[in-house]
Image (spheres, grey):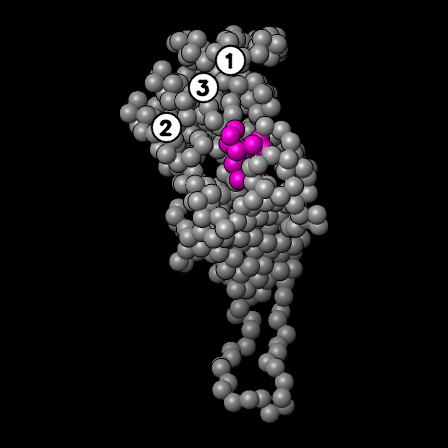
Amino acid sequence: MKKLKIAVAGLGRTGWRNHLANLAKLPDLYEICGVCDAMESRRKEAESTFGCASYANLESMLREDGIEWVVVATPQILHHEQTIAALRAGKNVICEKPMAVNSSQAEEMAAVASETGRHLTVFHNLRYAPDFALVRKVISTGKLGRILMVKIHRNDFSRRWDWQTLKKFGGGNLANQGPHVLDHALCLMNTTEPGIVARAEAAVTLGDADDHVKILLHAKSSPLVDIEISSADATGADRWKVYGTSGGLVGDGVQFQCKYFDPAELPERTVQETPPLDRTYNSETIPWREESLSLTEAEVTRPLPLDYYTDLHRAICNGNPPPISTAHALAIMRLMDRVWETAI
C-alpha cells in the first residue's frame, strides 16, 4: 500500500492534536516527513515524538523534494500565503478551516491549485461526525417525510480571551465553528448558494470578534436550515432538530429521539368549508411510532481526523480527487462572506 509523504506547517493546538497525533496512528497510510514552526521547543518535541525532520520556516520545508502533501495548520490569516507557496512548490495541500480570511483569497488559492495541477482540499473533518451521519441516515429513510427545517445549534455559555477572539487574526465563532456547520448545512440542501438572513455580534467574548451567530439558510425545494453558534446561551439547546411532514428527530449529539408515522395509516380527509356543528376544532389520533437512537462510545470517542485521513488516502490511491472538493470549500467561504456582509 502506497504511503503518502506528508508534512505539517504549524505545531499549535490544531497542528499537533488534530493532524500529527492522528497521522501517527496511520503509519501504513502516511509517512510524516517534516514539520515547521517558529518555536524551537516545538520543533524539537516533534522530532523526538514523530521522528521527523523539522524546519524553522515553511520555505525551507518546501524545498524538500520528498514531501508530497503539506498540511497548513497555521492561523487562518496565513492560509492564503502559505497554501499558495506550497502549491507553487509542487505540493498537494490540506488547508485547515477556515480556508482563508475571505472568499477572494480562497478563489486565488483555488486558481493556483488549478494552474499547478495540485490537489487542494480543506480539513472539514466534521463531515465524518457520527451525529451528522446519523441525522443524514434517518432523513434518507424517508420516514420523516419531506424535510421542512433542520436546526443545527452549537451553543453554550463561555467567555474566551485568546487570539481567536480578535478580528485582526480572523477570529470569532463563525470562523472557528462556522465552516463545520455550514458544511453540514450545504450537504443537507440542494444548493451551494442559498439565501441568507443572519446576525453576528460580540456578546460575552473579551475580544471584538463574533461569539453569537444566527443564520437562516433558505432555497427553493430545500429545507430551511436554522443555525446557531452562540457562546451566550446559558440554558443550552439541542444540537439537532429535524422537522418533517410525517415526523421529526431531536438529539443532543449522542442521544436522539425519532417520532414519525406512516401517512398510509391515516384516514383520507377533505377540507370542510362549513363550520363544525359541535363547535370544536378538527382532531384525530395519529399512530405515532417512536425510536430511541444512540451513538456508541466507540463512535463518540473515535478521533474524526482518522476518518478524514483514511478517506483521503483511499481517494488519492484510487486516482480520485479528495472527498472534500475545492469547489465545496469555496462555497462555504462565500457563505461566510455573505454572513459577515449581511449580518443585521
Amino acid bearing label 2: Met
Residue 155 placed where, x, y %? 63, 45
Contact check, label 2 and label 1, Cβ < 8 Å: no
Indicate yes or no whether the magenta region holds residue 166: yes
Q: From which residue to which does the magenta span run?
A: 164-175
Please report the residue visible at 59 percent of the width from the left and 42 percent of the height from the top: 202
Mark number, residue 109: 2
Contact check, label 3 and label 1, Cβ < 8 Å: no
- Mark 1 or mark 3, which is nearer the start of the sequence? 1
> Label 3 belongs to which residue?
70
Residue 262 placed where, x, y %? 55, 66
Left or right, 95 with reference to 251: left
Query: Which is more toward the observer, 203 or 62?
Result: 203
The Cα–Cα distance between marks 2 and 3, rounded to whole angstroms, is 14 Å
- Total marks placed: 3
Please report the residue visible at 39 percent of the width from the left and 27 percent of the height from the top: 120
Amino acid bearing label 1: Cys
Which structural element holds mark 1? Answer: strand
